[in-house]
Amino acid sequence: VLATKTLSISTMANTSEENSGNLKKQLAKLFEASLRETVPSKHDVEPLVAACTAKFGDYQCNNAMSLWSKIKGKNTDFKGPPAVGQAIMKNLPPSEMIESCSVAGPGFVNVVLSKTWLAEKIQNMLVDGIDTWAPKFSIKRAVVDFSSPNIAKEMHVGHLRSTIIGDTLARMLEFSKVDVLRRNHVGDWGTQFGMLIEFLFEKFPNFEDVNERAIGDLQAFYKASKQRFDTDSAFKERAQKAVVCLQGGEPKYRQAWAQICDISRKEFDKVYQRLGVHLEEKGESFYNPFIPGLIEGLSNKGLVQESEGARVIFIEGINIPLIVVKSDGGYNYASTDLAALWYRLNEDKAEWIIYVTDVGQQQHFDMVFKAAKRAGWLPAGDCMFPKASHVGFGLVLGDDGKRFRTRATEVVRLVDLLDEAKTRSKAALVERGKAEEWTEEELEQTAEAIGYGAIKYADLKNNRLTNYTFNYDQMLNDKGNTAVYLLYAHARICSIIRKSGKDIEELKKTGVLVLAHPDERALGLHLLQFAETVEEACTNLLPNVLCEYLYNLSEYFTKFYSNCQVVGSAEETSRLLLCEATAVVMRKCFFLLGIVPVYKI
Ligand code: ARG
């Protein structure tokens, strides 16, 4: 096995199964065998295989230098790293996938892959489906905790980012056959409910009649109740009592709480429905009953200490402790997250628990995870499963470089944001004359795919830790690295195939794909790098890696298409198959990014 110290592809992926799609891994297997042969005394050397940056080959093995430093001065016949490299090359087991090898500089072993083999692999994928290129992971179940807005408060662009990023991560894991629990950890518990419930009773003495129409805007309702809370001490007192009643489970209070949650939920669902995102709600309230027992268990282990009236867990290397019981005896965000983590490990039996929130919560999660390690719930090392990961992201900025808002002070209503993108993309389509060409339904669907796709892609293409500027003109531009450009590129490929008049399903069975021209080969190789790309994006929880791959794919295709005639050429069949393979891979990328593909434009 390929042992590593960090969480890498090899620790996560099941190496015993054949990874038919993953070039890097297949080469690593060959080099592993060679390394064992080359230096039998060092049988646990991990093969270091990477895509070539220079033109010497497609992949390279970088073990020679580090291996040399391990064996030099000891009983060895090698004269230096280049000689080690030569031996590694010589000892490679014969394989159909390799066309030629060479050793460069201080011992890099460069590999040129066989065109015939590459072509065959692509053709197999066309016949057997792209799922044969899915990564294979050793874990069975994961929790992705994402979106997670707070009841009665606004769902802001931060939650939109969490929803988009979390959905993609879930999709990539699901594609890799991991059972994913998509958890919406909504903020549905806490002291704000006291004032909300009390305000509800006041406004609607017959509160069973309450519905969203009566309340209207829940955010305004929140503001009004907060105002009352801050200015009227009698109200404040009643609100504080209401919290106790709610937490004590008094039916009338529970019912009012449930009604408020329900109104919020309907608002959230409008966003999820537009985005095509599915989530299962298990909010903070769900974990509440587990907290007392867990705190007691942690106290018995000697982990919980008294500090300024509160009960806390000290974490090595962090100067503030994790408060698990507030000085007033109540629980907080951290107590809930400890309970949720415990539940996910022990009841959900998840092996990887992924939290998608803004980077501002990084320390919170760091402390929760470290407390869980101290408690022995999680293994001490970072590379081992079960594992918890925080997926942080940066801010969304407006054109003024400040936190994104519509008007000067107001927060953005997410539904409006999505509708605007759709309206604009529809206008662009109408301008291109599509209103005459298409049915109203086609126009609507395409506008939606492009508008929502543009918002998602503009978010996902950046490294998630960086802030980005929200700009409709940029994201809806049909040139450059945008969803619009990519969706058009896909539609164009589909139209090439349609216009050929050939039955592509038939060609898959009878035709032969060859990669003769250098631009065909470059495109073919990139297609085959899909599997390792998804695996990397998934392992490092970085959707931008997949976006970059998709953008490059479309660039490779453009180069191929401008230099190689497809329809009407002698190579038509082969080239149509290459077009189809590109379209299939593009569509899978879109799917994993939560973008609906467009077939004609
Ligand atoms: N409700 C929180 C917020 O809006 C996010 C919750 C994230 N998940 C968690 N398990 N803490 O900031």
Image: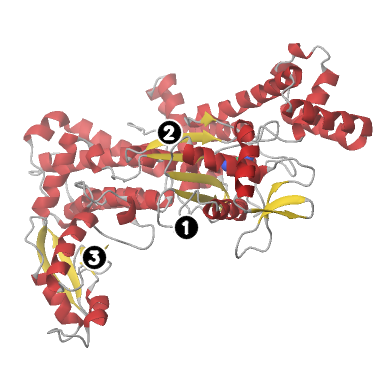
In the image, what residue type sits under mark 2?
Arg
Using the rendered image of the protein, determine whether residue 15 is visible from the camera's viewpoint: yes
Q: Earlier in the sequence, mark 2 or mark 1?
A: 1
**Left or right, 445 with reference to 422:** left
Residue at the location (8% across, 57% down)? 95
- Residue 398 spot, x, y in % from top left: 63, 49
**Left or right, 78 with reference to 281:** left
Say which mark, if any, is on residue 432. 2
> Residue extending furthest front?
300
In depth, the one of 388 and 495 nearer the eye is 388
**CA distance separating discs 3 and 1:** 26 Å
Query: Which quarter of the figure has residue 169?
Result: top left
In the image, what residue type sits under mark 1?
Ala
Say which mark, if any, is on residue 47. 3
In depth, the one of 457 and 533 nearer the eye is 533
Residue at the location (61% across, 26% down)? 265
Is residue 306 positioned above or below 261 on the image?
below
